[in-house]
Amino acid sequence: MTAAVIDGKAFAEGLRARVGGLAAAFEAKAGRKAGLAVVLVGEDPASQVYVRSKGKSTVEAGMNSFEHKLPADTTEDDLLAVVAQLNADPAVDGILVQLPLPAHIDEQKVIATIAPDKDVDGFHVINAGRLAVGQPGFVPCTPLGCLMLLKDRLGDLSGLDAVVIGRSNIVGKPMAQLLIAESCTVTVAHSRTKNLAEVVRRADIVVAAVGRPEMVKGDWIKPGAVVIDVGINRVAGATEGKTRLVGDVDYASAAAVASAIAPVPGGVGPMTIAVLLRNTLVAAYRNAGLELAADAV
Ligand code: NDP
């Protein structure tokens, strides 16, 4: 069997187009554009790239992008004051503080200061709690993007066995919650899991979010399973001095067994920003008291 390739890039483009259409409708109804504020502290090159790319995508979707670039030596109090000002600003529907923050700033304290209804990253404990108890809130972008790809591929997920490898607050745990809500039977594996290969072999759905290059091998995969690879790992390339991106799954061997697989790059990666735009749009409709159908995006 050769697995079908789950084309996250194409799905993300479609999602961005739907968000763009609804953002234009929002502007017509609300008399203003939806707005996303992104706060970057310091000059981490990867974070700068992410922030630029988020800003560009936000504007392309017909929403306002407010970028706040603060020096690396910004104090925690000053950052909290910026967040408080964005919380109070009616032009701002979503707030994203780019992580990681410099070591002298307490990330949890900053996240806790973001108004939960503007927390489009879904990292605030209120939103984690809402997800856990099944109330509407904001779900972290990467796992929500994975769920969209899975539902697009499989339709109804109920009764399927899902294994999530990784238990971070950003990916693994919210992914598990989303799959429970879809009535999957969910196992969450992590660094202490015994017989990981055997655990993974039970799964109809495998989501790998570990951060270890090509750790999940083809002979761990049940024939016909659907594999979502969240990992982004940079490894040495074939040419000296060059690097390449690989996932947490050994693509070639897994693709020989799975029915479908999301590759790296081009699978989950493009979904994250598309879902961020989607969450910002949903925030704008809610903040303005406007109706948006649950299945609109
Ligand atoms: P974390 O480092 O926060 O979590 C990694 C998880 O993997 C932990 O729960 C850890 O277990 C588990 N783990 C580590 N080693 C093993 C092992 N040998 N066997 C089984 N489990 C193991 O990472 P994130 O969740 O933030 O990210 C995971 C990956 O996804 C990374 O490659 C990251 O770059 C990528 N990523 C991609 C995004 C995208 O947009 N596509 C967005 C976010 C992340 P334990 O808890 O026991 O330590």
Image: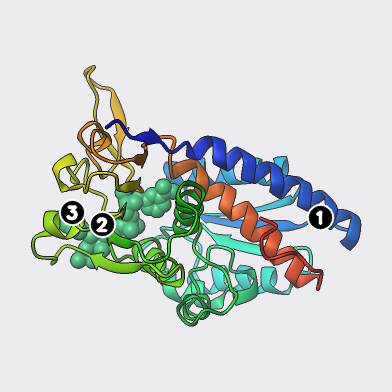
Question: What amino acid is found at the position of numbered circle 2 in the picture?
Answer: Ala
Q: Which residue is mark 3?
A: 201
Q: Residue at x 34, y 47 (%)?
A: 226
Instruction: Look at mark 1 in the image and give the residue it sits on.
Output: 33
What kind of residue is marked 3?
Arg
The reply to whether the C-beta atoms of the residues labelled 1 and 2 are less than 8 Å apart is no
**Residue 83 position (above or below residue 270):** below
Residue 155, image x, y percentages: 50, 54
Task: Tell me which amino acid carries mark 1.
Answer: Lys
Ligand 1 is within 8 Å of the C-beta of the residue at disc 2: no
- Between 287 and 143, the residue placed more toward the observer is 143
Check whether the beta carbons of the residues at disc 2 and disc 3 lie within 8 A of each other.
yes
Q: Nearer the viewer, mark 1 or mark 3?
A: 3
How many numbered discs, if any?
A: 3
Q: Label 1: state its secondary structure.
A: loop
Q: Horizontally, is 111 left or right of 282 in the view?
A: left
Classify 112 as above or below 2. Answer: below
Q: Could you say which disc has been placed on residue 203 in the image?
A: 2
Numbered disc 2: secondary structure: loop
Q: Is residue 36 visible?
A: yes
Dividing the image into 4 quarters, which one contains the C terminus? bottom right
